[in-house]
Amino acid sequence: MSDSKRKGWYITPDGERIDMPEPENEDGTFSLKQLQEAVGGYIEVVQSSLDMAKGRVILADEEGLIKQLPINIAGTVMCGRPVVGNIVVIDEECWS
């Protein structure tokens, strides 16, 4: 990633890793709309000691379990608890 602002990706339940688009906010952070589109709904922070130690934030669909979204194996492993649907991984500085 050549642009220093571009510091995020999302992982689908089938394991596909997709780069996030450029952050929309002028301060280099991702907009709420961008994050909600990536997870497919309302966002919630999912605690992960693996990524918090690296200065990253993991987000998931807040209603993923209610929507009965498919399990996200990568997210489940990273977070140490069941995670469903798309997960977003962004650098902490891109989170507002």
Image (cartoon, rainbow, N blue to C red):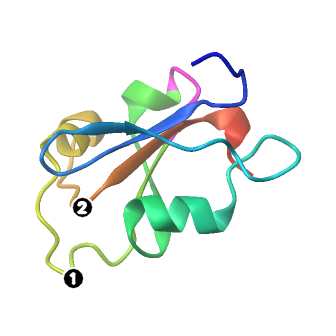
Which element carries disc 1, helix, strand or loop? loop
- Above or below — where is 21 with respect to 44? above
**Amino acid at dot 2:** Gly
Q: Give residue 92's position: percent from left, percent from top.
A: 64, 35
Image disc number at residue 30: none
Q: Which residue is mark 2?
A: 85
Q: Nearer the viewer, residue 62 or 6?
A: 6
Residue range corresponding to the magenta coloring: 53-57
> Between marks 2 and 1, how big is the CA–CA gap?
9 Å
Write the residue at 68% across / 46% down: 95
**Amino acid at dot 1:** Lys
Disc 1 packing (10 Å; few <14; some 14–19; many ≥20)? few
Write the residue at 40% across / 31% down: 49
> In screen coordinates, is 22 left or right of 29?
left
Q: Give residue 72's position: percent from left, percent from top.
A: 17, 50
Is residue 56 part of the magenta span, yes or no?
A: yes
Which element carries disc 2, helix, strand or loop? loop
Discs 2, 1 touching: Cβ within 8 Å: yes
Q: Which residue is mark 1?
A: 67
Write the residue at 24% across / 61% down: 85
Residue 31: which quarter of the image?
A: bottom right
Is residue 7 part of the magenta span, yes or no?
A: no
Number of marks drawn: 2
Q: Give residue 74's position: percent from left, percent from top.
A: 20, 38
- Above or below — where is 33 with respect to 50? below
